[in-house]
Amino acid sequence: MIAREDIDRIVPALRRTAQALCAGPDAVALGDEICRDAIRRTLRSQPPPPEQVRLEVWVTVILVDSAREAVTRRPSQVAFAAPDPAADGLRERVSMALAALTHEEREALVVVSLARFSYIEAAAALGLNMAQLMQTLTHARDRFAAALGQRGRARRDPSHLRVVK
């Protein structure tokens, strides 16, 4: 059984990840709903042994699954239009650039750059093999950088993603 203190410790990171996965105008509300669903599922589940997988990775697998279900339940609330070029602040531009990605690209970029999972952990969390993850991540980084008007910068410095926090 998972201790409530362990869940409380990772909730801020889970919320950031869920909100970034949702991206767009309702990201906070929808991300929080997805995060609550993932925490409920986590507390009802039997965790794997800590030597097999970190708690953060295991809960993120559940979170990604919840986000994917939200996409199928309410695609109009999760898939958003292209970024608004008139968005002023960096936070808004980052959110809109994330919203412009496909859900799969957003998952890969968020899990690697925001949640800071290793490539191996990210591939496992997303149910991808390493080649699929790297291909999706490359497309995501290129499209994200282009949406921000910073072609090529995303590969060298993904720090602007941390603005989502």
Image (tube, rainbow, N blue to C red):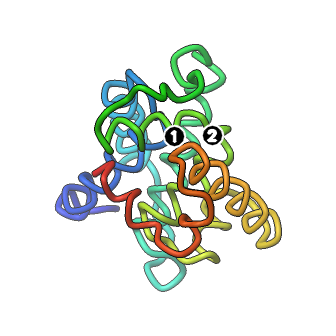
Left or right of 60 on screen, residue 107: right
**Callout 1 secondary element:** helix
Residue at numbered disc 1? 97
**Callout 2 secondary element:** loop
The residue shown at (59%, 46%) is: 106
Asked where in the image residue 93 lies, by quadrant, the reply is: top left
Asked if the residues shown at circle 1 and circle 2 are in contact, with their CB atoms under 8 angstroms apart, the answer is: yes
What percent of the width, then of the height, locates residue 138?
Answer: 71, 63
Nearer to the camera, 137 or 30: 137
Left or right of 120 on screen, residue 165: left
> Which one is closest to the eye, mark 1 or mark 2?
1
The residue shown at (54%, 66%) is: 153
Farthest residue to the bottom: give it: 51
Nearer to the camera, 60 or 85: 85
Left or right of 69 on screen, residue 34: left
The residue shown at (42%, 38%) is: 95
Question: Mark 2 Cα within 10 Å, few/some/many (few <14, many 20+)?
Answer: many
Looking at the image, residue 150 lies above or below residue 38: below
Kind of residue at badge 2? Leu
* Spatial separation of the CA atoms under disc 1 and disc 2: 7 Å
What percent of the width, then of the height, locates residue 122?
Answer: 60, 67
Residue at numbered disc 2? 101
What percent of the width, then of the height, locates residue 91?
Answer: 31, 42
Looking at the image, residue 59 lies above or below residue 63: below
The residue shown at (77%, 73%) is: 130
Kind of residue at badge 1? Ala
